Image (tube, rainbow, N blue to C red):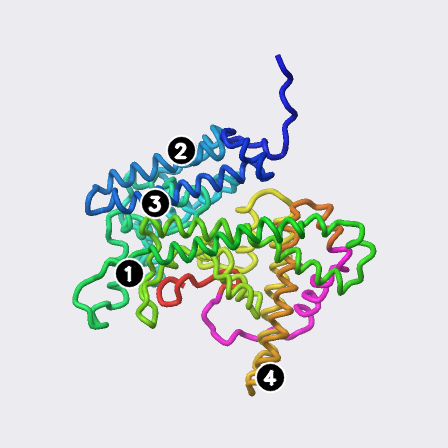
Amino acid sequence: MAAEPPPSLSYRTTGSTCLHPLSELLGIPLDQVNFVACQLFALFAAFWFRSYLSPGKTSPDVRHAFATILGIYFVIFCFGWYSVHLFVLVLMCYGIMVTASTSDIHRPLMIVTQKITTLAFQVHDGLGRKAEDLSTEQRRLAVKAKPSFLEYVSYLLNFMSVIAGPCNNFKEYIAFIEGRHTHMKLLEVNWKKKGFHSLPEPSPTGAVIHKLCMTLVSLLLFLTLTKTFPVTCLVDDWFVHKANFLTRLCYLYVVMQASKPKYYFAWTLADAVNNAAGFGFSGVDKNGNFCWDLLSNLNIRKIETATSFRMYLENWNIQTATWLKRVCYERVPWHPTVLTFILSALWHGVYPGYYFTFLTGILVTLAARTVRNNYRHYFLSSKALKVVYDIVTWAATQLAVSYTVAPFVMLAVEPTISLYKSMYFYLHVISLLIILFLPIKPQAHNQRQPQTLNSVNKKKID
């Protein structure tokens, strides 16, 4: 018998190995090939689901069953029978949804963790709390009857979001399955007041095509830019010992920019899959155009032009930030910013780099808030000063984000310490000095504004 070939990086996966030849041909790890294959198949399945299993032709139970079975298949294909942990978690949590305990689990279970805890709190709000104790949003999203088991597993394991998300609300998902989703959103914006007498059927095709174009551009950037500037450059001898500080600062920014396209690709494709199935309609904009951004996970334009740490975070991984807000920030009695960052680190996993990033993020967030509250109003007296302020804060924000998130990409302790030593821990030092010596002034608005959280749709949810 011939000896088995040595395992390669592209072959290591707990899921299916049937695409191994394609993985070897492209030089891309097999787990990533499996992920893309499932998402592309999900895209075609979503169009079919919307056309042939539409609410007008099929009962909700059939739609729930199909979405669940295909989702389970995707999980097994990507992660193998190792993913039995996911199914055990789903079964264990059914029936105890009135509690709101969170669980830090392995990466394939991250989206399901979000959904379980989201549903747990929404059931708790609907069944275990008085209406007058809830915020307006909590009342709107409260679930006042325990879901059936089929509704529950469909919400958690449906093929549109089980692999890459995004997290969504139970009531909105059920409305989508039952065919009430788009009409609900149109009624929320008083459609009849706009001069129309019947509710239209908005088509997601244009939104899907636009997002697929963005996905293609992100993929091309990933295959070129990301490979040209890998994160390993940050621990090279040239970077650590020979480059001057300004060169390191600029190079760190370039490398972190190069690491973004894979996130842009994965999140935009996941958004397109949901839209193709008819889910994600958010209403009508001020120009009367239909919007399909209810489940969008990022706003690339606002990310790249962000002039504050807060603005950057509000537009990055939007649905996760919304989840953090709803299960932690709005509910903890003290230090909401700190506890929200800590929960985010725990949810992401056990790599030390995650904790470096989120603990650094706490310092930077508090320092940025202090600077903004102390000095921003001085630059609002003229347009020229405001332009100068925006340019300076844009540059500071982009460099601060690059410094903060580098450990998240590097993962391990040794390269993180090596990087931060080569940068003289400059942002840690500056942030601490700001927090210690600048006066703490209240924000312009007394209402609690989460620094790590976002607005999916300003008119409705956040």
Q: Position of residue 251 (x, y in %)?
A: 71, 59
Image quadrant in which the C terminus is located:
bottom left
Which comes before the other along the chain, label 1 or label 2? 2
The image shows residue 99, relative to residue 448, as above or below, that is: above
- Residue 190 covered by magenta stretch: no
According to the image, label 2 marks what residue?
73
What amino acid does circle 3 point to? Ala
Q: Which residues are magenta?
A: 420-449
Helix, strand, or loop for circle 1? helix
According to the image, label 3 marks what residue?
46
* Nearer the camera: disc 1 or disc 2: 2
Tell which residue pokes out farthest to the bottom in this image: 382
CA gap between label 1 and label 3 equals 21 Å
What amino acid does circle 2 point to? Tyr
* Nearer the camera: disc 1 or disc 3: 3
According to the image, label 4 marks what residue?
385
Hey, which quadrant is residue 91 in on the image? top left
Is residue 343 in view? no
Which comes before the other along the chain, label 1 or label 3? 3
Q: Residues within 10 Å of mark 4 (few under 14, many from 20)?
A: few
* Dot label at residue 185: 1
Q: Residues within 10 Å of mark 3 (few under 14, many from 20)?
A: many
* Nearer the camera: disc 2 or disc 4: 2
What amino acid does circle 1 point to? Lys
Q: Do callouts 1 and 2 mark residues in contact (Cβ within 8 Å)? A: no
Q: Nearest the camera: 338 or 268?
A: 268
